[in-house]
Image: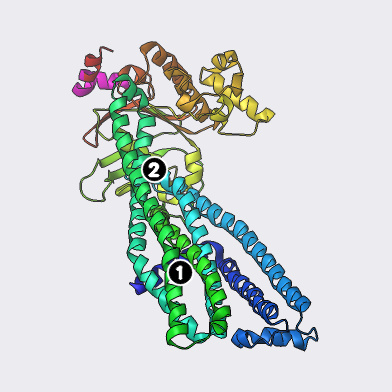
Amino acid sequence: MKVDILKRFKENVRYYYEYLGWRIFPLLGIGLFVGLLDGFGLAMFVPLLEMAADGEPSSGESMGNLKFIIDSIEFLGLGISLYSVLVTMIFFFVFKGIAVYVSNYLYAVYSELFIRSIRVQNIDALSNYSFTSFVKADAGNIQNSMSGEVQKVAKNFQMFVYMVRTGLILLTYIGLAFLANPQFSVLVIIGGLISHLIFYKLYKKTEQLGIDLVKSNHAFQGLLIQEVNFFKYLKATGLVKEFSKYLKNKVYDLEDQNRRVGILRAIMQGSREPIMILLVVMIILIQVEYLGGELGAIILALLFFYRGLSTLMSLLDSYNSYLSTIGSLQNMKTFTNELISNKENERTHVNTVENFEIEIQNLYFSYNGNQDYILKDINLSIEENETVAFVGESGAGKTTLVNVIAGLLKPSKGTVKIGSSGLDDIDMNQYRKSIGYITQEPVIFDDTVFNNVTFWGEKSEKNIARFNKALKKAGIFDFVQQLDHKEESRLGNNGISLSGGQRQRISIARELYKNVNILMMDEATSALDSETELVIQKNIEKLQGEHTILIIAHRLSTIKNADRVVIMEDGKIERVGTYDELVNNSVSFRRMVELQEV
């Protein structure tokens, strides 16, 4: 039991040290100085009480081994008087106040550094997270870990610092009490250990509830994301109340766990001090009545222990709060390690992409790395600035192939070359910046038109000119000019204030603003009405010859003017040719055309 506690404590200190380094030691160690200064200041009450009782200067004998303070005052030639004792007391408490200020100042500075470092590390780790791992991850876990759980880790760190500082102060009081009266101090420590055993099970229960709370928060955040993402469907189908009922049940479970943590905390806070006082009273009676000790001889030790008692109450309270957030700390370690351990492979040598010709040879792909291949023996060459369409039934592997070309998925076997270099040998960041990717559900941020298109670019004359050019090429310039605030108009959550066609054109404008070399369109017009689809199709056709365009389409009317069409079936390429060639020579393609009455 003790081994587990010490092991976990060391692991947590190591975790804090990873972010703060040497700073953790002065942050924690200053509590020792606070305790010593406070203890020395308290010790000066003994000579005051003796002077009040006897009317004569104190000899300091009742202070035990702390008599050295009185001896130091006499050594300095100040003499033992009311004024010298009061001045000494003020000296200790003033410097204690300075130590407390330094302690809190260091905490404010270092806690900000600690939490900022965690957030920045997780943001960097998420941006480097492999796409293959991302598609298997829990969105609720990611959101909760990067938002709410960070706050709980901050609370955990706060309680840890306070707990260690308070523990050092408590040890100081115990040490000073030993100097004043060793026998009485031993009895009080035994009483403290008894009280700890009384509360141990409650501590363990609090820790387990803290771990359960993290899991419940992950589940709740995941459901919340789904309600927001699928709100239109839930509202339109009358299922929103059913989903809300399910969500509310999760809220009840979550808050029930919070309630139980609160009740445990109330039990411990309400019973801790009475139990400790009862133990101290019993120890005083044992010391005086059974061991023959004098009450005057234990006054200073009793003063330290009374001060230590309130410190112990704070220590146990912070320890309980620490345990209630320990699950968040463990989750943060696991989450960060998951992101880092599944990051994309780093390249020691990279080539700059200069030619965007695409060459695919003997390509196989599987998500699980086994023989259950989604793509099988793919061989395809795509010329720079060529427009190639991919068609086939759902599940044929079209999107997976495009994702491999985009570098999101790593081939299980075979190679993909961009120009003369394989995907493993190129500067992937530079390559991806040359790619535009437009899906059936366009990506629209809750910001202005300008920021959506320029991706928060500086509003310089050069960027404004690029912005307007991209809008015109995407066929949305006139619409933006008609808005009340023109390019500064906000588009709402996921572009809720725009039509489907307008959202797609904003997405196209963003990719054109980037001046991409490869434009990937994954069923980009399948959710649009025929008239809007035709307008966007004409806008795309105007881009042919300027960019390499890869189109995934179910509506064959949108690919009539593609340079080539690739028919895919069951993860394989069945046939490649122009639209007219395939209509004449491919039975399966001709049947698809006839079914759609193109």
Amino acid at dot 1? Ile
The residue where tag 2 is placed is 408
Q: Alpha-carbon distance for marks 1 and 2? A: 65 Å
Q: Which quadrant holds residue 93?
A: bottom right
- Of residue 372 and residue 265, the one placed in the foreground of this image is 265
Q: Which quadrant holds residue 453?
A: top right
Is 213 rendered above or below residue 552? below
Q: Secondary structure at mark 2?
A: loop
User: Which labelled disc corresponds to residue 136?
Assistant: none
| Residue 201 placement (x, y as % from top left) | 32, 64
Q: Is residue 582 magenta?
A: yes
Magenta region, mostly helix, strand or loop? helix
The residue where tag 1 is placed is 277
Is 471 rendered above or below residue 32? above
Magenta residues (range): 579-591
Q: Residue at x 26, y 51 (%)?
A: 369
| Residue 492 placement (x, y as % from top left) | 50, 25
What crowding class fits label 1: few (fewer than 14 Cα within 10 Å), some (14-19), or many (20 or more)?
Answer: some
- Is residue 588 visible to the viewer in this orientation of the structure? yes
**What quarter of the picture does the C terminus occupy?**
top left
Residue at the front extreme of this rendering: 54
- Is residue 135 visible to the viewer in this orientation of the structure? no
Looking at the rendered structure, the number of numbered marks drawn on it comes to: 2
Report whether 389 appears left or right of 353: left
Q: Residue at x 47, y 40 (%)?
A: 432
Q: Secondary structure at mark 1?
A: helix
Is 156 rendered above or below residue 419? below
**What quarter of the picture does the N terminus occupy?**
bottom left
Q: Which coloring applies here?
A: rainbow
